């Protein structure tokens, strides 16, 4: 990464990006003075205050978004304190983790926050990872027989499988690489990450070729997919990873920064303006390399 790009990611105006960059790119320990100071600034910031308020709202999806924000920023349950535990376990109790197509991403965020040590989370993670199909992906969860007839064979859902890729990558970062990791990686690499096996020029899902952020269930961008594959040990010189970098670099500006191509109208947290250079996309792109 060019020094000027790194300095941009580490600007004091965005402690949430700075913390994640310090932890994953600079690889500083939790007790490093720069990490400690950055956490202090983040926990005293307006952006954190807004997420904490969202966590305490009644609607499950508000809590889901707050959990995602904390995880993306590099915080842990210990950083946030006792406030988060009651909300997390309350959400689990009320939903059983079953938040439409969002369960794998919720589990990834809980693992990132440090909840894999809890039996209820570990058991759910271990249970859902056993559902991997023969093709290395994960199947549609819809109960609509027109979409997902249990009496007919179905290929895996690429959107859902991308969420599982993030979950498995996070587990691996924490030293818990699941047995299904290699099969899951192969699901993407045999497609040069993004494409249909019957037509290697047509994307499985169009959103995968962009830099959608913050992540949303069934909408995961190229920067996060390529990042997760790199975490899981994919050779950067391989054909698949080279295609991943090519797609990523379509969104790279001359100054080395990457552009946000799309986001939800009401995202989990405000990450920047669509069509403009973006710190989050840039951070993921360089972590992927």
Image (spheres, rainbow, N blue to C red):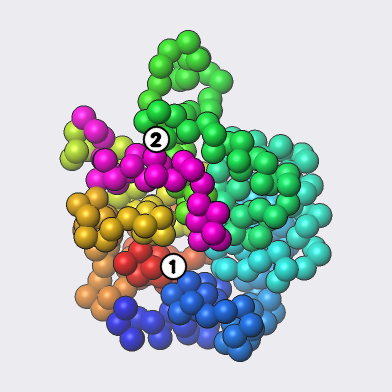
Front residue (pair 12, 284) = 284
The front one of 145 and 161 is 161
How dense is the environment of label 2, judged by Cα within 10 Å: few (below 14), some, or many (20 and up)?
Answer: many
Q: Residues within 10 Å of mark 1 (few under 14, many from 20)?
A: many
Q: Position of residue 17 (x, y in %)?
A: 50, 74
Labels in figure, total: 2
Task: Based on the picture, tell me whether residue 173 belongs to the magenta stretch.
Answer: yes
Which quarter of the figure is the C terminus placed in?
bottom left
Magenta-drawn stretch contains 199: no
Q: Is residue 273 visible?
A: yes
Q: Residue at x 20, y 52 (%)?
A: 239
The region drawn magenta spans: 171-198
The answer to whether mark 1 and mark 2 are in CB contact below 8 A is: no
What is the spatial separation of the Cα atoms under label 1 and label 2, in whole angstroms?
A: 29 Å
Position of 147 relative to 68 (above/below):
above
Residue underneath mark 1: 280
Residue 37 position (above or below residue 157) = below
Q: Residue at x 71, y 64 (%)?
A: 77
Which residue shows up at 55% across the image and 61% down it? Answer: 174
In this view, 21 is above or below 159:
below
Q: Of marks 1 and 2, which one's residue comes earlier in the chain? A: 2
Q: How far across and down, in percent of the image, does residue 263 sit? A: 44, 54
Residue carrying label 2: 136
* Image quarter hosting the N terminus: bottom left
* SS at circle 1: helix
Front position in the image: 282 or 288: 288
Q: Quadrant of residue 115?
A: bottom right
The vertical placement of 2 against 245, above or below, is below
Q: Position of residue 228 (x, y in %)?
A: 41, 55
Residue visible at 60% across and 41% down in the picture: 126
| Residue 58 visible in image | no
Q: Which element carries disc 2, helix, strand or loop?
A: loop
């Amino acid at each position: 990464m060019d020094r000027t790009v790194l300095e941009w990611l580490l600007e004091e105006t965005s402690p949430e990006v700075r913390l994640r960059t310090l932890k994953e790119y600079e690889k500083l320990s939790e007790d490093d003075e720069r990490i400690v100071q950055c956490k202090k600034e983040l926990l005293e910031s307006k952006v954190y205050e807004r997420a904490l308020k969202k966590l305490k709202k009644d609607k499950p999806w508000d809590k889901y978004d707050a959990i995602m924000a904390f995880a993306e920023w590099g915080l842990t349950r210990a950083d946030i304190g006792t406030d988060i535990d009651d909300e997390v376990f309350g959400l689990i109790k009320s939903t059983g983790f079953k938040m439409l197509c969002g369960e794998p991403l919720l589990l990834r965020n809980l693992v990132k926050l440090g909840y894999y040590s809890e039996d209820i989370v570990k058991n759910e993670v271990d249970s859902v990872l056993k559902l991997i199909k023969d093709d290395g992906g994960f199947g549609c969860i819809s109960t609509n027989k027109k979409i997902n007839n249990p009496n007919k064979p179905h290929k895996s859902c690429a959107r859902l499988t991308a969420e599982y890729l993030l979950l498995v990558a996070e587990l691996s970062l924490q030293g818990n690489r699941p047995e299904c990791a290699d099969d899951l990686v192969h699901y993407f690499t045999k497609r040069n990450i993004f494409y249909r096996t019957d037509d290697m020029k047509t994307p499985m899902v169009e959103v995968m070729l962009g830099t959608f952020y913050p992540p949303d269930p069934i909408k995961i961008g190229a920067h996060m997919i390529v990042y997760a594959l790199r975490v899981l040990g994919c050779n950067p010189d391989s054909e698949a990873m080279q295609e991943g970098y090519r797609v990523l670099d379509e969104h790279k500006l001359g100054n080395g920064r990457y552009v946000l191509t799309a986001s939800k109208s009401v995202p989990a947290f405000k990450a920047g303006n669509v069509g403009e250079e973006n710190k989050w996309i840039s951070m993921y792109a360089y972590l992927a390399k």
